[in-house]
């Protein structure tokens, strides 16, 4: 059963100075390559047209499918309307860091003296030690090696070898004996040798024309470019993960400070109630209520302290620091607002996102792979040869060389080429769909991040006004309590309202800063813009 056919035309020239008896023929002296001289030349020159039909189970494909891109799960930011505080619904933000971005290798200075960590230093450490970036570098290196391998199919291969050969030949086994040649067989010896000779040769081979190999190389080059762009996008993802986690740690520290101020306030109310109880102006019930409120605030403070410590451990895990390393955050969660850019300008900037360009490069790679599969139907030309010295000794050896040009024409491949083409077309269709979907995903990410920031700006303004009103309410309740016009219940309620308002304000700041970071990531400028956002600057 025929499964593959290759028609090969081979032109081969073999010449040895002392080995070829016709070395001075017209072909070698005039260097004419006419067919007449080729056919009339002796055994030193061979022109063969060979039709080779293989009965193997299937043909071997020269087509190389571009491997699909494999990327690690990226960090994500979600902002949803959830209950926050006592009675209001606010947009509450959350950062989810998964996969290799959630861990890192330990830095050489992972353990050491306490340090003060700025947002810039945290990001630089993350870019250097976070596993998300390291994994992207590995994928980049793998894609580069694939490109080098595809390029090697287009470059010449040169080898050199040195050998010593010892032979003894049985002439009887070759048919030179009295039984096979009755007349002259007895004149031949039973064996020749032993004889030996040395050989030193340099061999070279190259694909002179192979359109499939050329297309494979172009596809691998685009895949390598896609991997480079994917690596740059991985840096953006690392910046997003580190900055958002740093911001979350700042938020917990702000909540600790708020809880500490609430404990001080509750302590002052309890001291005032205790003094009035001792003076007989208040009952012990009022003092006990104030003490319960104080202890509740103390419990809340302990909870916030524990969460703040764990959040710093999470940050340390992202940037190559040991979990035992003590460090403080040099930045502060401030309430400055940045001007919100227009959507159209953001859309234009987002077109240069590295992940979008990477998907486009993968599309071009799939197109080249499709062309490579179709090019399998075309002939290919390969040249090879060697030049060297052979003889009983190197000093008395003869120069020998060989030159071969092979034209391979696919005749019948058992459906292998059609299979390769269909596979490449399926991959191309998927790549086109992925690129189209990615374009819409980018637009949606930009618009969603823009809406989050716009909502957070308005939410923060309301939260700040609400906090001021809650502070005024608490002061009025305490004044009423001090003159005996109100009891501890009213003061406790005012304290709860203020705590809720403080929590809403801190959440509002966190949501705004996180929305700004997310917007910088959505337009592909996280590495450049994020370090400046916490300082109130935007490009």
Image (tube, rainbow, N blue to C red):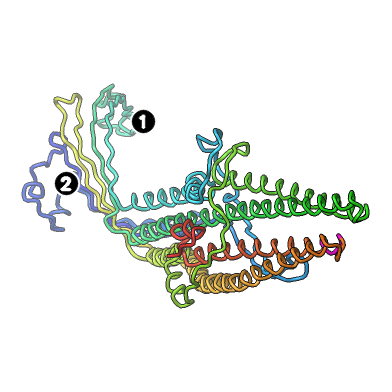
Q: Position of residue 528 (x, y in %)?
A: 43, 58
The answer to whether residue 141 is seen in the rendering is: yes
Q: Residues within 10 Å of mark 1 (few under 14, many from 20)?
A: few
Quarter-of-image position of residue 247: bottom right
Instruction: Provide the residue span drawn in magenta.
Output: 488-492
Residue 255, position as x, y percentages in the image: 68, 54
Q: Considering only vertical position in the picture, is 490 above or below 272?
A: below
Numbered circle sitting on residue 173: 1
Mark before the other along the chain sequence, 1 or 2: 2
For disc 2, the neighbor class at 10 Å (few under 14, some 14 to 19, many from 20) is some
| Up-down relation of residue 164 to residue 45 (above or below) | above
Identify the secondary structure beneath mark 2.
Answer: loop
Give the number of the disc on residue 447: none
Where 352 sits versus 98, above or below? below
Q: CA distance from mark 1 to mark 2?
A: 27 Å
Q: Which residue is mark 2?
A: 42
């Amino acid at each position: 059963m025929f499964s593959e056919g290759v028609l090969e035309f081979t032109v081969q020239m073999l010449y040895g100075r002392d080995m070829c008896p016709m070395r001075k023929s017209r072909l070698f002296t005039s260097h004419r390559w006419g067919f007449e001289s080729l056919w009339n030349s002796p055994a030193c020159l061979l022109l063969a047209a060979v039709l080779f039909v293989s009965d193997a189970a299937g043909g071997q494909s020269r087509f190389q499918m571009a491997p699909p891109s494999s990327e690690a799960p990226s960090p994500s930011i979600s902002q949803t309307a959830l209950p926050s505080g006592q009675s209001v619904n606010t947009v509450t933000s959350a950062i989810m860091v998964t996969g290799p971005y959630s861990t890192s290798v330990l830095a050489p200075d992972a353990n050491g003296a306490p340090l003060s960590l700025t947002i810039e230093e945290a990001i630089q450490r993350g870019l250097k030690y976070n596993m998300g970036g390291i994994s992207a570098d590995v994928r980049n290196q793998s894609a580069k090696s694939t490109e080098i391998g595809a390029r090697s199919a287009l470059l010449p291969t040169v080898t050199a070898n040195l050998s010593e050969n010892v032979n003894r030949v049985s002439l009887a086994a070759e048919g030179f004996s009295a039984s096979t040649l009755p007349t002259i067989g007895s004149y031949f010896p039973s064996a020749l040798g032993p004889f030996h000779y040395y050989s030193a040769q340099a061999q070279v081979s190259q694909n002179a024309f192979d359109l499939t190999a050329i297309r494979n190389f172009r596809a691998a080059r685009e895949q390598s470019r896609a991997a480079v762009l994917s690596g740059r996008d991985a840096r953006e993802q690392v910046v997003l993960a580190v900055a958002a986690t740093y911001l979350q740690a700042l938020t917990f520290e702000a909540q600790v400070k708020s809880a500490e101020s609430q404990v001080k306030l509750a302590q002052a109310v309890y001291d005032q109630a205790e003094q009035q109880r001792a003076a007989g102006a208040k009952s012990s019930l009022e003092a006990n209520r104030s003490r319960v409120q104080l202890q509740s605030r103390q419990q809340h403070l302990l909870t916030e302290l524990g969460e703040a410590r764990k959040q710093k451990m999470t940050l340390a895990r992202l940037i190559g620091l040991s979990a035992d390393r003590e460090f403080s955050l040099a930045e502060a969660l401030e309430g400055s607002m940045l001007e919100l850019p227009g959507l159209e300008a953001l859309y234009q900037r987002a077109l240069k996102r590295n992940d979008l360009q990477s998907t486009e490069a993968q599309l071009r790679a799939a197109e080249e792979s499709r062309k490579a599969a179709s090019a399998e139907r075309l002939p290919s030309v390969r040249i090879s040869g060697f030049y060297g010295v052979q003889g009983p000794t190197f000093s008395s050896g003869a120069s020998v060389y060989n030159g071969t040009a092979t034209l391979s024409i696919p005749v019948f491949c058992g459906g292998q080429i059609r299979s390769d083409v269909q596979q490449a077309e399926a991959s191309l269709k998927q790549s086109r769909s992925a690129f189209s979907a990615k374009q819409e995903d980018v637009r949606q990410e930009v618009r969603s991040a823009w809406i989050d920031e716009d909502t957070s700006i308005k939410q923060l303004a309301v939260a700040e006004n609400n906090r001021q009103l809650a502070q005024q309410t608490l002061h009025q309740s305490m004044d009423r309590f001090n003159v005996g016009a109100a009891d501890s219940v009213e003061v406790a309620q005012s304290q709860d309202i203020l705590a809720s308002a403080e929590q809403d304000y801190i959440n509002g700041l966190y949501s705004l800063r996180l929305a700004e970071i997310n917007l910088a990531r959505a337009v592909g400028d996280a590495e450049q813009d994020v370090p400046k956002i916490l300082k109130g600057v935007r490009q």
